[in-house]
Image (tube, rainbow, N blue to C red):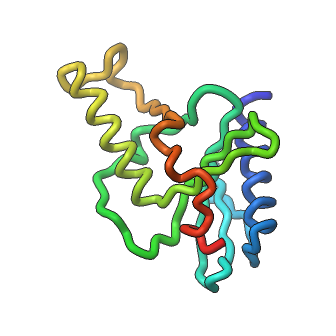
Amino acid sequence: MDKQNTAEIGFQTAKKEIMKRGGTDVIDHKEGNKKFITFTGLDSKQYKVTSRSKKSGTWQTTIAYGKSRNEKQNEDEFWLFIDITFNPPKFYPVPLWWIQNNIHEAHQKYINKYDGHRKNNDNSNHHAVQLRRIKKWENQWSVMGI
């Protein structure tokens, strides 16, 4: 299973789970090569979800998503981390403001260990998200109105 298959399996798994949990008007969108899902929650609010899936190790993203953010009450945008190694898969619905801030803080902590640089390659924008960082969001579907 390659990276693209992992991403697509996770995306389809996310759509099915959102519908199973009562989300309606579930639509997938594509902007460039970025895919996301919109749906209406049980609270009648519209939500936008980007999926991030993995079959081993850590979830992969880039530091471009990191930014210092304050808590946003009534967030309507989320990243849904999916671990497809489990059957059934494990889900971590994370508010966008939270993951952006977490990526920012984790990256700052990392580069501070190396005097403001990456250990091996300052030009890399890779960022790994470990389970321990998002574990508290496991099955917290209510934040997405379902």
Q: Quadrant of residue 58?
A: top right
What is the x, y in percent for residue 132? 48, 37
| Residue in the picture at 60% in, 78% down | 46
Q: Is the N terminus in the top left, top right, bottom left or bottom right quadrant?
A: top right
- Which of the pair 118/44 is nearer the observer? 44
What is the x, y in percent for residue 140? 58, 60
What is the x, y in percent for residue 13? 78, 52
Relative placement, left or right, of 2 versus 111 is right
Vertical position of residue 85 compared to residue 89: above or below: above
- Which of the pair 136/31 is nearer the observer? 136
- Which of the pair 128/143 is nearer the observer? 143
Residue 32: in sight, yes or no?
A: no
| Residue in the picture at 57% in, 36% down | 59
What is the x, y in percent for residue 135? 52, 44
Vertical position of residue 43 compared to residue 21: above or below: below
Q: Is the C terminus in the top left, top right, bottom left or bottom right quadrant?
A: bottom right
Q: In the image as oriented, which residue stretches furthest toward the bottom? A: 44
Q: Quadrant of residue 117?
A: top left
Q: Quadrant of residue 54?
A: top right
